[in-house]
Image (cartoon, rainbow, N blue to C red):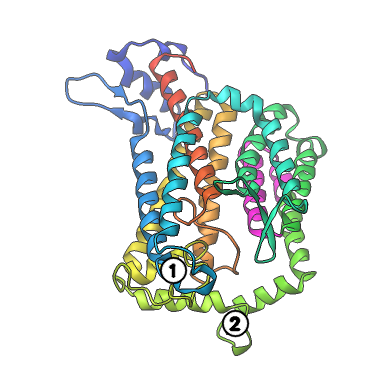
């Protein structure tokens, strides 16, 4: 598709006609979603808004719901001897603080041009690897429940795997832009990315954090596919990765037991062991029925369902607010993922390949992680230690989620500037 340079002239009287001419050329061609940005009234010229307000509002609603449900899921935790020194509002106040810090970080991120992120992408990826190494160093990384995944930063504990998800989306997009001329050569196009995945996978599995590795690997492979890597090479890469996951499960007694528990959670051998969280999550959904038991009325959060305010927050939503609320959350993440893809697709249409692939990689991250978390809560997937983006309790997750969405908004803002005739 060729780009009509005259479209960049600020001639708003002919704006709509030029858009139609650019994005409806050819028989059977699919219209690109630039029309989503245009507000046209009778007798008035079309105009383009400055920000994607729908994306901002959906994000705000998910954050608000998450804040309410984190409080509801954690309000009784101080009755547990482990949390006896915590006030009932401890997790609520901490989550509100995390959102405040993340909001400031997102505003700062929004000021950084995408061209700068493209230059920084390899260095950001290297920094994320360095932080993943630091996590494993004794007396530096912090361990919880047998896993070393956090770096203590005083105000909050930072989880480098969350940074690695964003860094991989940037690095893979940058890599595909730099390797556009060798996409048909397997060794030159895929092997360097495979080595990067192997290194980051080794570090994550040493924590261990297989869930984060699955998300990062999915983001990397999706960007390779969207970037135009040969189909046979892509499916070969997927087959190798799936084989690696099967091998890791086969060689780990702990992971094998999780799979068996997932397949038969009500078996007495598993119900009080590896399937304990899953069975109580299913009980929570069953109690919620259509409209729920009412906000604050969950029984499972009363020390029956472990990690109710983090990994299994959706189960509490289902129990208290019912199927309707769960359906709303699912639709919210579907809409958010689709909107991010629309923005990325628009950037590619404007010949901004790095920005477009990076945005789509972030969309894969949000869509994939939310799908895995919901699947685990609903018993569709084996238990994994992944939070629900924007909703679950946790400083690192909320911080990197909002920073990533700020980058997507920056991509969208620069797209709109180009459409007005400005420069990025």
Q: Residue 315 got which mark? A: 1
Q: Nearer the viewer, residue 404 or 174?
A: 404
Q: Residue at x 62, y 52 (%)?
A: 215
Q: Nearer the viewer, residue 47 or 116?
A: 116
Q: Which residue is mark 2?
A: 264
Instruction: Report the magenta stretch's main SS.
Output: helix
Q: Residue at x 54, y 39 (%)?
A: 360
| 323 lies above or below 231 | below
x, y (%) of residue 78? 45, 69
- Magenta stretch encompasses residue 198: no
Q: How many marks?
A: 2
x, y (%) of residue 268? 59, 89
Label 2: element kind:
loop
Q: Nearer the viewer, residue 330 or 94?
A: 94
Q: Nearer the viewer, residue 152 or 269?
A: 152
Q: Residue furthest left?
A: 43
x, y (%) of residue 140? 72, 49
Quadrant housing residue 184: top right
**Sooner in the amino-acid sequence: mark 1 or mark 2:** 2
Q: CA distance from mark 1 to mark 2?
A: 19 Å
- Callout 1 crowding tier (Cα within 10 Å): few <14, some 14–19, many ≥20: many
Q: Which residues fall within the magenta stretch?
A: 208-235
Tell me, yes or no, whether the two marked residues, 1 and 2, touch with CB atoms within 8 Å.
no
Q: Residue at x 52, y 71 (%)?
A: 306
């Amino acid at each position: 598709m060729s780009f009509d340079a005259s479209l960049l002239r600020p001639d708003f009287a002919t704006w709509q006609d030029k858009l139609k001419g650019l994005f409806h050329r050819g028989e059977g061609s699919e219209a690109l979603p630039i029309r989503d940005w245009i507000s046209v009234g009778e007798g008035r010229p079309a105009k383009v808004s400055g920000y994607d307000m729908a994306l901002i509002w959906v994000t705000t609603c998910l954050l608000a719901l998450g804040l309410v449900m984190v409080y509801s899921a954690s309000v009784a935790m101080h009755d547990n001897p482990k949390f006896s020194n915590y006030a009932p509002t401890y997790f609520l106040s901490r989550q509100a603080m995390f959102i405040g810090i993340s909001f400031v970080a997102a505003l700062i991120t929004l000021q950084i041009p995408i061209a700068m992120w493209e230059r920084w992408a390899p260095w950001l990826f290297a920094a994320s690897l360095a932080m993943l190494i630091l996590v494993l160093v004794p007396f530096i990384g912090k361990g919880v429940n047998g896993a070393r995944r956090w770096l203590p930063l005083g105000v909050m504990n930072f989880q480098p795997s969350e940074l690695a998800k964003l860094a991989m989306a940037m690095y893979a997009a940058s890599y595909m832009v730099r390797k556009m001329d060798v996409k048909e050569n397997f060794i030159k196009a895929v092997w360097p990315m495979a080595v990067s995945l192997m290194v980051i996978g080794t570090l994550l599995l040493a924590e261990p954090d297989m869930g984060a590795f699955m998300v990062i690997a999915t983001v990397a492979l999706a960007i390779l596919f969207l970037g135009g890597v040969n189909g046979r090479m892509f499916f070969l890469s997927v087959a190798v990765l799936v084989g690696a996951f099967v091998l890791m499960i086969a060689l780990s007694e702990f992971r094998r037991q999780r799979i068996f528990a997932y397949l038969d959670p009500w078996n007495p051998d598993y119900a009080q062991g590896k399937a304990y969280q899953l069975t109580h999550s299913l009980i929570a959904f069953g109690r919620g029925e259509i409209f729920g038991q009412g906000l604050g009325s969950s029984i499972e959060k009363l020390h029956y369902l472990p990690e109710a305010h983090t990994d299994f927050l959706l189960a509490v939503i289902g129990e208290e607010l019912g199927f309707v609320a769960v359906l709303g959350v699912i639709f919210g993440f579907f809409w958010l993922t689709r909107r991010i893809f629309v923005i990325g697709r628009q950037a590619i249409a404007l010949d901004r390949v790095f920005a477009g692939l990076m945005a789509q990689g972030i969309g894969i991250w949000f869509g994939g992680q939310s799908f895995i978390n919901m699947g685990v809560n609903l018993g569709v997937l084996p238990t994994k230690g992944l939070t629900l983006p924007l909703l679950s309790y946790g400083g690192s997750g909320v911080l990197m989620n909002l920073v990533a969405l700020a980058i997507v908004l920056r991509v969208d803002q620069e797209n709109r500037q180009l459409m007005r005739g400005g420069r990025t």
